[in-house]
Image: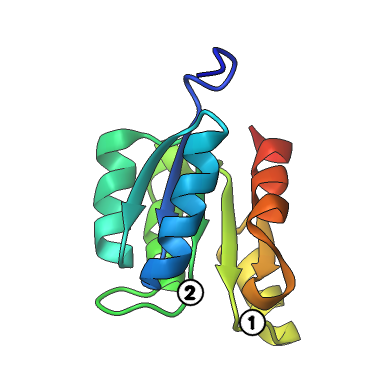
Amino acid sequence: MNPNNSDKKVLIVEDETLLANALEMKFKNAGFTVFKAENGQIGLDMTVSQKPNIILLDLMMPVMDGKVMLKRLREMPEFKTLPVIVLTNAGDVDTIRETKSYYNASDFLIKSNVTPDDILNKVRDYI
C-alpha cells in the first residue's frame, strides 16, 4: 500500500452493485480504504462512523436518495466542507445546477461519460 494513500478513505454510495464493486476495486488497487453503501441512509450512517475523506454519491437510490443524504450531511457542521462528488446519470442542466448550488456538491460526473480511471483522478484532485 502506498503510504501516501493509507489515510485516504473513500465512501462509495451507489446502489448499482457492478459499478460499486468496480469502483471499490479501482480505489483499493490505488491504495485507498474503501467503504460502500447501497443507499443514502447507510451512506449517512457510514459517513458519521467512518469519517471518509471524500464521498462518491449516486443521486437515484432506494430508501434515501443522494440529494436528501447530501442535504442532511451539509446540516452537520463537521461535514459541511467534506468533498462530495455526485456520480449519476441524471445529467440535465437543472439537476447539475441544483445539486451544485443548493446541495453544495463538490463536483458532478455523469456515469455514462466517465471511466473508473476518470473517477479516481477526480478524487485525487480533492484529497
- For the residue marked with disc 2, what is the amino acid? Leu
Vertical side of 124 occupied by 13: above or below: below
Residue drawn at (64%, 82%) of the image:
95
Residue 44 appears left or right of 53 = left
Q: Nearer the viewer, residue 80 or 109?
A: 109
Whichever of callouts 2 and 1 sits on the residue coming sooner in the sequence is 2
Question: Are the two marked residues, 2 and 1, in contact with CB atoms closer than 8 angstroms?
Answer: yes
Q: Secondary structure at mark 1?
A: helix
Q: Nearer the viewer, residue 112 or 42?
A: 112
Mark 2 and mark 1: Cα distance apart in space: 10 Å
Residue 103 appears left or right of 51 = right
Q: Nearer the viewer, residue 112 or 7?
A: 112
Residue 50 appears left or right of 58 = left
Q: The C terminus appears in which quarter of the rendering? A: top right
Q: Position of residue 27 (x, y in %)?
A: 52, 41
Residue drawn at (48%, 74%) of the image:
59
Q: Position of residue 56 (x, y in %)?
A: 51, 55
Viewer-side label of 2, 1: 2
Residue drawn at (51%, 54%) of the image:
23
Q: Nearer the viewer, residue 52 or 2?
A: 2
- For the residue marked with disc 1, what is the amino acid? Thr
According to the picture, the residue beneath numbered tag 2 turns out to be 59
According to the picture, the residue beneath numbered tag 1 turns out to be 95
Q: Is residue 70 visible?
A: no
Vertical side of 97 occupied by 8: above or below: above
Residue drawn at (25%, 37%) of the image:
49
Q: Is residue 72 visible?
A: yes
Q: Position of residue 124 (x, y in %)?
A: 68, 37
